[in-house]
Image (cartoon, rainbow, N blue to C red):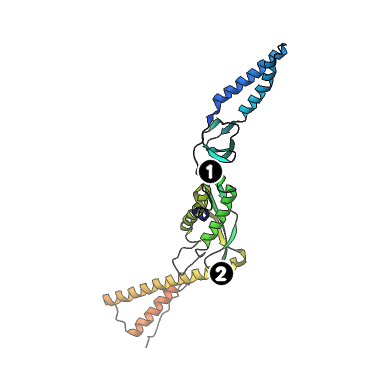
Amino acid sequence: MNAIQEGLLRASDERAATTNSGYPVLLVLVAIIAAEAWTVWQLAEGFKHWTMIVSMIFWPLAFVFVAVGFYMLQPNQAAVITLFGTYKGTDRTDGLRWVWPWLGKHKVSVRANNFISDKIKVNDSRGNPIEMAAQIVWRVVDTAQAVFDVDDYKEFVRVQVEVAIRTVASRHPYDDFDNDDITLRGHLEEVGVELLKEVRERLKVAGITVDECGFTHLAYAQEIASAMLRRQQAQAVVAARQTLVEGAVGMVEQALADLSKRDVVELDDERRAAMVSNLMVVLCGERDTQPVVNAGSLY
């Protein structure tokens, strides 16, 4: 992409080629076959004029000349036409087609293609090794760029998808419980959109667009998987505890406020502290609480 912007690579541009329907030319080919058969019949009958000898040489050459120009295109298939290496246009009309024999024909599929990358080891924004794989649906939209601007556009797709995965992975952490930042595991849809834009930008130079993109594999690398799993579980427990404590504090605060507002009971600081302690134990404890009968008093 930078090479095109800096003028180091001349970008090609698809245009329509001048070609012909192959069906009228097919009639010409049939006529040539008939003429050759008539010539052979005349020679067999003993008519050995010099024109018959010339016809025996001319009609086979004419047959080869016409037959070489035929080619067939299926729906969503194109043919890049060249003349001694010079691009002359692209034919996207399906059916039986014909061009002059000295023109080259290179067929290119413009159908949707599905590509699933291999699992590759990359580093997230925190340097943790992770394994990722992606699936994309791509198709050729500019046949001239696909044929002339890259050496092998299918291999180009494979390499650029891998580079895009590494680029996107390096921007985000695999997981994060402390902040609300975008993570690879927790925001697959957002990261998938980011990967789609990255791949589209990289494949634009080859005349290829991407219709769909998503991750097929995302996990920590094997050498740190067990350690990161324990860390992930610990972070999840801490985050859950923090949420639980925040909720318990709010509930205790609301309970004390309601008791004071309704004059249900008058609590001094010591009783208030004891009540707060008991409520926090009940609300934050992992096990069910056991009722205890207090026969005495706090004093």
Task: Compute the Cα span from label 1 to label 2.
Answer: 53 Å
Q: Residue flagged by tag 1: what amino acid is it?
A: Ala
Q: Closer to the camera, 122 or 239?
A: 122
Q: Nearer the viewer, residue 189 or 274?
A: 189
Crowding around mark 2 (Cα neighbors within 10 Å: few <14, some 14 to 19, many 20+) is few
Q: Is residue 148 above or below residue 226?
A: above
Q: Which residue is mark 2?
A: 230
- Residue 162 visible to an observer of this rendering: yes
The residue tagged with tag 2: helix, strand or loop? helix
Q: In the rendered image of this protein, does residue 128 appear above or below residue 277?
A: above
Which residue is nearer to you in this view: 5 or 78? Answer: 5
Residue 224 in picture, x, y percent from top left: 60, 67
User: What residue is pinned by disc 1?
Assistant: 144
Q: Position of residue 102 (x, y in %)?
A: 60, 33
**Residue 171 as seen in the image, left or right of residue 224:** left
Residue situated in front as seen by the camera: 139 or 207 = 207
Quadrant housing the C terminus: bottom left
